[in-house]
């Protein structure tokens, strides 16, 4: 699976960037092989619409999941429309985020973690308090999480089988 990680620098030892649309780099990692490609974020210096441009770029690169510190509503909408889940990874390096993702310790966010207005002020984004989910929404979110965990488990079991046969 190809994942995109927002990073403050071009290596797996760099911190996960708390910004999505204006992150310094996207690290594209193939979770099976561990192959990594660091790409400077082409939208980082955009005067406006950086989140949308960055999300479109990530989708065009074939990412199947995103790991980031935060995600704005416009970015989230583009990724959601493309079927790309967003996992929040804060206070860790890109390598630690990938390991947490592989181990199923990261949870997909059901929406933006901050409003787009925050990135104009330079301060850290503070997520708004989550609205209490409607029971049907909560059930759907839990089913999605279970499906993602089942896939992660199946991938891990396949990997164990392959390694056991070597």
Image (tube, rainbow, N blue to C red):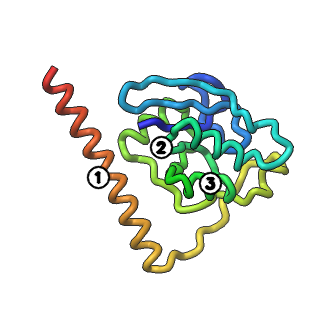
For the point 15% across and 26% down, the residue is: 164
Decide if residue 52 is in sight here: yes
Q: Which mark is residue 150?
A: 1
Query: Which residue is the site of mark 2?
Result: 64
For the point 27% across and 46% down, the residue is: 153
For the point 51% across and 40% down, the residue is: 63
Q: Mark 1 falls on what kind of element?
A: helix
Q: Is residue 77 above or below residue 92?
A: below
Mark 2 vs 3, N-terminal side? 2
* Picture coordinates of residue 22, whole percent (x, y): 73, 40
Category of crowding for the residue at label 1, using alpha-carbon neighbours closer than 10 angstroms: few (below 14), some (14–19), many (at least 20): few
Q: Mark 3 falls on what kind of element?
A: helix
* Picture coordinates of residue 105, whole percent (x, y): 40, 47
Quarter of the rendering occupied by the N terminus: top left
**CA gap, disc 2 to disc 3?**
13 Å
Mark 2 vs 1, N-terminal side? 2
Query: Which residue is the site of mark 3?
Result: 78
Category of crowding for the residue at label 3, using alpha-carbon neighbours closer than 10 angstroms: few (below 14), some (14–19), many (at least 20): some
């Amino acid at each position: 699976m190809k994942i995109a990680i927002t990073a403050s620098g071009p290596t797996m030892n760099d911190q996960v960037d708390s910004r999505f649309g204006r992150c310094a780099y996207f690290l594209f990692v193939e979770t099976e092989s561990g192959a990594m490609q660091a790409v400077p974020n082409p939208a980082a210096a955009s005067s406006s619409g950086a989140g949308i441009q960055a999300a479109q770029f990530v989708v065009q690169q074939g990412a199947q999941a995103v790991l980031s510190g935060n995600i704005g509503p416009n970015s989230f909408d583009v990724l959601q429309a493309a079927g790309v889940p967003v996992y929040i990874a804060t206070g860790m390096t890109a390598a630690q985020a990938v390991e947490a993702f592989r181990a199923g310790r990261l949870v997909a966010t059901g929406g933006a973690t901050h409003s787009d207005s925050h990135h104009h002020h330079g301060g850290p984004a503070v997520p708004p308090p989550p609205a209490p989910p409607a029971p049907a929404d909560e059930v759907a979110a839990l089913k999605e999480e279970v499906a993602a965990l089942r896939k992660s488990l199946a991938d891990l079991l396949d990997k164990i089988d392959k390694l056991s046969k070597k």
